[in-house]
């Protein structure tokens, strides 16, 4: 994308405001801080909760007929991550200075030193670039080591035995995959089925940077959407329309400008390989728009094959431009096919298939194994039963190969038996359906990154003061209540209104300190959409003023109608004003 004018100081101002007013700050500050960890203050916590609830509204509540929500443990056993491929593939390239000992993420070091985009390149390719470009340590100019892989999993033990290895989960997805059959049965065995989860994850980043953008611990919001790729279409009447896409094919040609295309056309033309992947990208487009991002300020960039995670057949990153850091990823959309369920089937031995009924029963020809139980009974005795059970787990191809050999006896299921005692016959039968492993489309968001996004888009300066134009729906505090002056009769009414609005569930602040102008400014600085002022007219006619943050317009409202009027304004379209 063409670069726009960058305002470097805006990010510094946002960070200063965040620390000063209680949105976020580096964790463990009194001990010098630890990279990759941030605390959320009172306002940041409320903002994050509102963002999470908005995500839940779009991805779960508006799809209650398709999506349900679960919660699974943060610590997972080693075998699960072996099955998922994370033990082998959840790595980043690391390089070390041989003089000062500093460690860097190798692809980032190369990109910053050369401008080359090398994310996802092999270790061999990265080493070749470091050698050919003669790269040195950015800190001391020392020689650099060979590039190697570094696993990003945080390891621990489960219980007192070091052999019982566990890990902090790097994604919420695996808990949903291993629970799929339980959820599927509890939801009356309906497909498609989305399983959503919101929770903490941890990734041991080599060199976290970009503040809240890349963290070692954060809250993830994910859906694993299980479906038959040949099944029903998404509910396009709910979410569809045009997407701004930068396909991998265009990136390969050096193109940087996204195309705009209708999502259904993009699916039909194979630009988006999975229709449900396209559908959830449309939901993500609308969700991010509600965070204060215009359609023209976001697009979906397809990852190159070497950039994709090991489980993905296609991935799109939703990118949004913010100050200082430029285009950042705010969500990832991966078509995981049946990779995860198939792997967990292989490692656990549990059946992850589901029954897919045909519209009408079909007459099909099937191959069946026939066993001469009389002959084998005399040969195996009481071991016959266990042999027959073991035989069920042997593929028809392996049995066919054995019984068509020229040997008199063959080994099947670990037992040597006469070749003629087992045969394969073809029969026709009526079948009502088949068993399939569902495919998965996954939208995934990091909540803390969205907190920074909202603040970046909301931050404005007007007449020398800061105004956070946070969308009303996610503003941490909805209303401020002020008495015009610190007069007892005004304070008494203002505090009564304050208490009533709190009891009705609104987030409210009360402030009677300083001039009314300064109090408006303090409320604007933390993004409060509306301010109620009790003045001397209130004492005579029971009315108050409601001031809107963005326009500074005011209306006069009866005290008895304050809550209903605020509710109306808080739920009106974002473009509406007093």
Image (cartoon, rainbow, N blue to C red):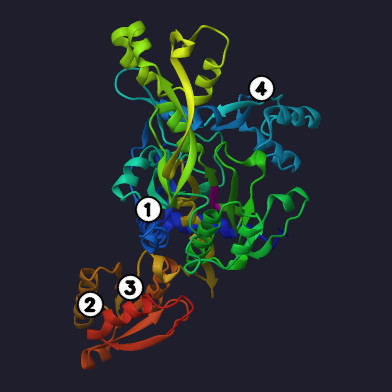
Q: Which residues are magenta?
A: 330-334
Residue 532 at what x, y percent from top left? 32, 79
Q: Is residue 175 left or right of residue 13?
A: left
Compute the Cα span from label 3 to label 4: 57 Å
Q: Nearer the viewer, residue 389 or 410?
A: 410
Residue 227 at what x, y percent from top left? 46, 50
- Residue linked to disc 4: 99
Judged from the image, the secondary structure of the residue bearing numbered disc 3 is strand
Compute the Cα span from label 1 to label 2: 26 Å
215 in magenta: no
Q: Is residue 466 left or right of residue 503?
A: right
Q: Nearer the viewer, mark 2 or mark 4?
A: 2
User: Residue 480's mark?
Assistant: 3
How packed mark 1 is, by other alpha carbons closer than 10 Å (few <14, some 14-19, many 20 or more), is some
Compute the Cα span from label 2 to label 3: 10 Å
User: Residue 497's mark?
Assistant: 2
For image coordinates 71% across by 43% down, the residue present is 117
Judged from the image, the secondary structure of the residue bearing numbered disc 4 is loop
Contact, mark 2 vs mark 4 (Cβ under 8 Å)? no
Q: Nearer the viewer, residue 157 or 351?
A: 351
């Amino acid at each position: 994308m063409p670069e726009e004018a960058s305002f470097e100081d805006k990010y510094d101002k946002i960070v200063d405001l965040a620390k000063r007013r209680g949105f976020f700050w580096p964790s463990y500050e009194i001990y010098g801080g630890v990279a990759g960890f941030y605390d959320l203050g009172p306002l940041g916590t409320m903002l994050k909760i509102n963002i999470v609830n908005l995500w839940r509204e779009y991805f779960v509540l508006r799809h209650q007929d398709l999506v349900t929500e679960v919660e699974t443990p943060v610590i997972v056993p080693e075998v699960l991550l072996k099955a998922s491929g994370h033990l082998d593939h959840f790595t980043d390239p690391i390089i070390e200075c041989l003089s000062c000992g500093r460690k860097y993420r190798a692809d980032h070091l190369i990109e910053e030193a050369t401008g080359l985009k090398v994310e996802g390149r092999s270790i061999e390719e990265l080493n070749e670039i470091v050698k050919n470009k003669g790269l040195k340590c950015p800190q001391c100019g020392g020689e650099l080591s060979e590039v190697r892989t570094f696993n990003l999993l945080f390891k621990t033990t489960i219980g007192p035995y070091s052999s019982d290895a566990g890990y902090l989960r790097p994604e919420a997805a695996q808990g949903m995959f291993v629970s799929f059959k339980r959820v599927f049965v509890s939801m009356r065995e309906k497909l498609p089925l989305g399983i959503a989860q919101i929770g903490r994850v941890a990734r041991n980043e080599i060199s976290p940077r970009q503040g809240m953008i890349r963290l070692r611990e954060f809250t993830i919001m994910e859906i694993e959407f299980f479906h038959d790729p040949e099944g029903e279409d998404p509910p396009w009447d709910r979410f569809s329309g045009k997407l701004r896409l930068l396909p991998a094919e265009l990136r390969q040609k050096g193109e940087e400008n996204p195309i705009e295309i209708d999502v259904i056309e993009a699916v039909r033309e194979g630009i988006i390989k999975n229709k449900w992947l396209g559908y959830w990208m449309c939901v993500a487009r609308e969700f991010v728009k509600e965070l204060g991002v215009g359609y023209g300020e976001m697009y979906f960039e397809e990852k190159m094959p070497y950039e994709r995670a090991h489980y993905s057949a296609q991935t799109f990153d939703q990118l949004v431009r913010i100050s200082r850091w430029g285009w950042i990823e705010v969500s990832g959309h991966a078509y995981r096919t049946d990779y995860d369920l198939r792997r967990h089937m292989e490692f656990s031995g549990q059946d992850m298939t589901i029954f897919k009924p045909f519209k009408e029963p079909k007459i099909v020809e099937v191959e069946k194994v026939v066993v001469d139980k009389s002959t084998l009974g005399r040969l195996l005795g009481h071991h016959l039963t266990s042999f027959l059970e073991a035989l069920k787990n042997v593929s028809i191809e392996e049995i066919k190969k054995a019984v068509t050999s020229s040997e008199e006896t063959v080994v099947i299921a670990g037992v040597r038996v006469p070749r003629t005692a087992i045969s394969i016959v073809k029969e026709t039968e009526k079948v009502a359906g088949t068993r399939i492993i569902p495919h998965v489309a996954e939208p995934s968001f990091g909540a803390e990154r969205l907190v920074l996004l909202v603040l970046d888009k909301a931050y404005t300066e007007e007449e020398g003061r800061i105004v956070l134009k946070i969308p009303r729906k996610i503003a941490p505090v909805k209303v401020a209540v002020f008495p015009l002056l610190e007069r007892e009769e005004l304070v008494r009414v203002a505090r009564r209104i304050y208490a009533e609005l709190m009891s009705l569930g609104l987030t409210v602040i009360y402030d009677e300190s300083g001039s009314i102008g300064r109090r408006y400014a303090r409320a604007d600085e933390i993004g409060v959409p509306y301010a109620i002022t009790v003045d001397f007219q209130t004492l005579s006619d029971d009315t108050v003023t409601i001031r809107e943050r963005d326009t500074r317009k005011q209306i006069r409202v009866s005290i008895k109608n304050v809550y209903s009027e605020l509710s109306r304004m808080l739920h009106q379209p974002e473009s509406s004003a007093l």
